[in-house]
């Protein structure tokens, strides 16, 4: 099963840009995911189990490395990538 996720990260830190960029860079390291970033959010497309595993891993890593942050996510069944 395929999954589409739209995710936004809001670090509770004055210097928030490096925290967001680091999160997006790590998502792009996964070869089997399609990641599209725009000014408001990042969209992730791929196999359901892989997408959920990556989101779980990277959100946990964000909390461990950078502390408090808010994540807003939308989950949609299927691959709704624009291509």
Image (tube, rainbow, N blue to C red):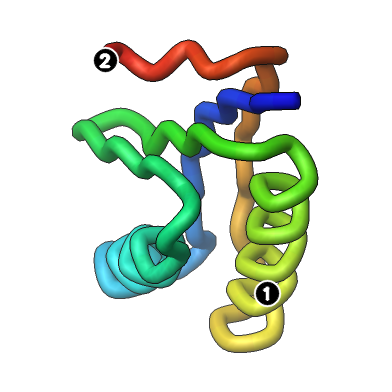
Which one is in front, 58 or 14? 58
Residue 60 visible in rendering: yes
Does dot 1 land on a helix, a strand or a loop?
A: helix
Residue at the (38%, 70%) spot, across then down:
29
Q: Position of residue 4 (x, y in %)?
A: 57, 24
Quarter-wise, where is residue 73 in the image?
A: top right
Is 56 placed above or below 34 here? Answer: below
| Disc 1 residue crowd, few under 14, some 14–19, many 20+, Cα 10 Å | few
Residue 14 visible in rendering: no
Q: Which of marks 2 and 1 is in front?
A: 2
Taking 40 as reference, is 4 left or right? right
Q: Residue furthest bottom?
A: 65
Which one is in front, 20 or 43? 43
Quarter-wise, where is residue 36 in the image?
A: top left
Does dot 2 land on a helix, a strand or a loop?
A: loop
Q: Where is residue 45 in the image (x, y as percent from the top left)?
A: 50, 33
Residue at the (78%, 46%) spot, across then down:
49
Which one is in front, 19 or 44? 44
Residue at the (75%, 25%) spot, across then down:
1
Q: Position of residue 57 (x, y in %)?
A: 71, 69
Quarter-wise, where is residue 56 in the image?
A: bottom right
Mark 2 = which residue? 83
Mark 1 = which residue? 63
Report how many numbered discs are placed on residues in the image. Answer: 2
- From the image, which quarter does the C terminus lie in? top left
Marks 2/1: CA–CA distance: 32 Å
Q: Where is residue 15 in the image (x, y as percent from the top left)?
A: 30, 72
The image's mark for residue 28 is none
Which one is in front, 24 or 18? 24
Q: Earlier in the sequence, mark 2 or mark 1?
A: 1
Taking 32 as reference, is 70 left or right? right
């Amino acid at each position: 099963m395929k999954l589409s996720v739209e995710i936004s990260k809001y670090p509770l830190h004055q210097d928030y840009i490096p925290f967001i960029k680091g999160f997006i860079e790590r998502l792009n390291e996964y070869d089997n995911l399609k990641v599209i970033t725009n000014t408001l959010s990042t969209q992730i497309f791929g196999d359901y189990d892989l997408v959920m595993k990556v989101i779980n891993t990277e959100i946990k890593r964000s909390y461990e490395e950078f502390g408090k942050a808010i994540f807003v996510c939308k989950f949609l069944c299927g691959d709704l990538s624009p291509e």
